[in-house]
Image (cartoon, grey):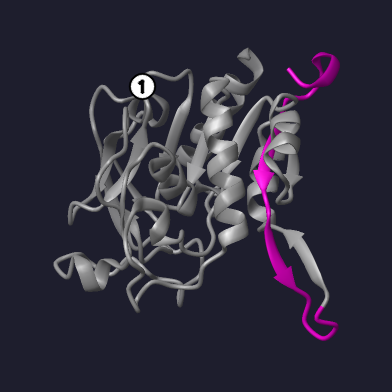
Amino acid sequence: MGAGGGTPVVGIPCYTGERAGSGRLFYGNNQSYAQALIGVGLAPLLIPPMDDAALESVCARLDGLLLSGGEDLDPARYGEERLPVCGPLEPERDAMELALTRMALARDLPTLGICRGMQTLNVARGGTLYQDLEAQRPESHPHAMGHLPRSARTHEVVVEPGSRLMEILGAERLAVNSLHHQAVREPGADVRIVARADDGVAEGMELPAYRFALAVQYHPEELFETDELSRRLFAAFARACREG
């Protein structure tokens, strides 16, 4: 539980951004992830891209890993050609997050994926993605609702009875926000889809063979302040990090 038995430390991989005006590059991530972790008694640690040896050293000091949202994963990472509808790519981040995810799973480190993080976890296990739901799954409802407030709930999700996610949330249906145009297509090794939107799009998954390896496609960090079910998800993650 953290260095010396203190507050559990959870890594959050960073992306590279450019500061408006100066053009200076920075590493960062959305504050909502860190604030949600702090809200359940965890200490967030932002992790910039680095080589695998350094990542191994960092991973050995973590009590948990949070894989956040962000730009699209490169389809080459799951054996596909990039379609024109695929969004901007972050190759440096892809390499770092996939390596770190595999390291975390090898250590059975509690891992929570959110949006892109769910997709990263699936690709790390050999799964594939829809590069664009509208183009490749036209029967889907709109899921890319970024024009609305990030906390706006736009559709419902059905959770599979008997799943770890159902046990955590205590609810079979929940209303969620939706900020993605990609989604899990073929689940990877040991991946179990445990929640879907009414149109069948994967909205939750877990790896039952691991102590806590779970992901959702919606954004509970944006609902944390007002939604009990989102707080339950982060609280369950925190318990897993402390039990380590």
The picture places residue 183, in percent across and down from the top left corner, at: 33, 55
In the shown orientation, is residue 218 left or right of residue 17?
A: left
- Residue at the spot x=77%, y=82% of the render? 20
Whether residue 177 is visible: no
Q: Position of residue 77 (x, y in %)?
A: 42, 53
- Answer above or below: position of 26 versus 220: below
Q: Residue 215 sits in which quadrant?
A: top left
Hey, which quadrant is residue 238 in on the image?
Answer: top right
Which residue shows up at 80% across the image and 81% down it?
A: 23
Magenta-highlighted residues: 1-23
Indicate the quadrant where residue 135 lies.
bottom left
User: Residue 1's spot in the image, x, y percent?
Assistant: 73, 17
Residue shown at the point (30%, 25%) measured from the top left: 163
Image quarter of the C terminus: top right
Relative horizontal placement of residue 179, taking residue 18 as reference (left or right)? left
Q: Name above or below for residue 91 compared with residue 8.
A: below
The residue most toward the left is 139
Q: Is residue 13 above or below residue 28?
A: above
Instruction: List the residue tagged with mark 1.
Output: 208
Question: At x 32% / y 73%, what residue is drawn?
Answer: 83
Q: Around disc 1, counting alpha carbons within 10 Å, would you say few (fewer than 14), some (14 to 19), or many (20 or more)?
A: some
Which amino acid type is shown beneath numbered disc 1? Pro
